Image (spheres, helix red, strand yellow):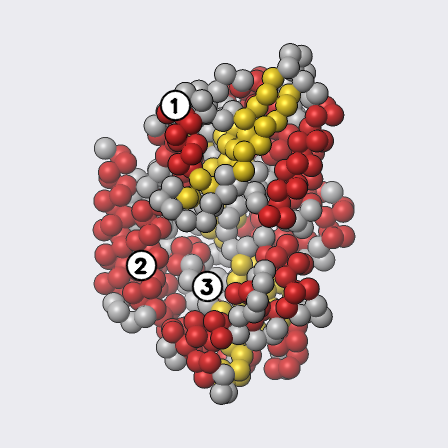
Amino acid sequence: MSRVTRRTVLAGGTPLLIAACGTAAGGGGTGAQIKEAVTLEFAHRWEGVREPLIAQQIDSFAKIQPNIKINAQQLFCSSGENCLGGMDLGKVTTQIVAGTPPDLFMVQSPFAADFAAKGSLKNLNDHAKRDKLDLNKTFYPALVTMGTYKGNVVGFPQLSGGDEPYLFMSTAAFQEAGVDPTKPPTNWEDLVAMAQRLTKRGAGAGGFDRIGFNLPTLFTQWAAKNNAKILSDDGTKALFNSQEGIDTLQWMFNTSQQLYGKWENRGAFMSANAGQGTGASRAPFYTNKVGMWGSGVWHFFEIKGEKEIHNPPFQYQVGIVPHNAKNSQAKLNSLAEVVWLYSVPNGSKKVDAAFEWLKYITMGEGNRIFVKAQNRPSPALKINEDPDFSRDNPHWNTVIKKALEIMVPLPQTPAWNKIATAITKMQNDTLNAVKSPRDAIAEAAREAQVALDEFKR
């Protein structure tokens, strides 16, 4: 598996070049000023502390496009069949079927592929070409690939990929164990050995006073770090039932046994040490009950607010979750399974105005407003060059120079929701010793292929 840099894209086919003469990265293109008053229906899921950021984006946009009014619908959900990624896509689907779609809506990339397969999303290629946007120089190319379905750009990324490449390390836990937190592990063996040094067995829940590593149940991420492919490049074949895939699942099981004795001991420990209020389940991180844990770029924002609730003096270091160095074919990478997109439904009659708003909140000042407040990177390269970002996040070099440049895209398919469900069951069956890794992965791969074939038909 090759490496993704700012100017290359892998594992997703040929890079999409919209126009030979692109605008500067992060710019708003050359779209015309909207001269007649228009109201856009805009559906998103940003609740809580991020809802005011949407209002700030709208107010800022009004200064450059005063004739465009944004009517924001907050469609956050926490459960239900049509609650996908926390976005109530059932309501969006109902509006589309009724002929009254939103003019722009928020959707995760696998579900965008589903909408696109049904002909419900606007192909944005022509608008991007009109405005001389070279999307692969504006956004990280892996994200462009994830917003493309059968050659058509069906959404622009509003955030960086939903991968979890970061290894967070409790400074206090490391210092107490006599381990240097500025020297993160560089391979799987180092990771396990370091976790064992950080572990404190005792009378606490599960038999621990501290666990050295909260093993993320992310088979797809670990598999990618062992040179295992999840899907074929065209998204039609399930490939993870390979020797590399089996070895990955076996390593996850072996590691859980080494670190916890039984998988349920980990859950018991985390539950017993949970706190109260916002970030309750993550309280063991901030109270130094866990030495290392993996997460995504959103966790910087979580830490900033949640540590004030659970342990204000909390300090941490950040590295990159390592790969399997024993496999000579394995590379340090991070698999992006999903990215949040903004897409325009085919039924919108205000596409030109919607495209101006789309550019503003994905590659323009509106996006900078949103991501900077959360100490997280933009999908637009130019925005991430803002020196304010590095001042606000001391780990910015790890975020930009390491994690984003090793990101590889998972081929997007409408079947991913069913595939992810099968993989989750596979992980649970394996870690709880219900099935062997070989049997569990074979079953999941069969279910995944059935799901892929159903959509292909």
Instruction: Give how far across and how far down residue 427 sits, in percent.
Output: 34, 62
Q: In this view, does 6 lie above or below 270?
A: above
> Distance of mark 1 from mark 3, alpha carbons?
41 Å
Mark earlier in primary sequence (3, 2):
3
Residue sitting nearer the eye, 129 or 244? 129
At 64% from the left and 54% from the top, the residue drawn is 301
| Quadrant into which the C terminus falls | top left
Instruction: Give how far across and how far down residue 305 sits, in percent.
Output: 66, 58
> Distance of mark 3 from mark 2, alpha carbons?
15 Å
At 39% from the left and 30% from the top, the residue drawn is 94
Q: Is residue 364 visible?
A: no
Q: In the image, what residue type sits under mark 1?
A: Ala
> Distance of mark 2 from mark 1, alpha carbons?
36 Å
The residue that mark 1 highlights is 98
Corner quadrant of residue 54: top right
Mark earlier in primary sequence (2, 1):
1
The residue that mark 2 highlights is 425
CB-based contact (under 8 Å), mark 3 and mark 2 = no
Mark earlier in primary sequence (1, 3):
1
Secondary structure under the numbered disc 3 in the rendered image: loop
Query: Label for residue 216?
Result: 3
Q: Nearer the viewer, mark 2 or mark 1?
A: 1
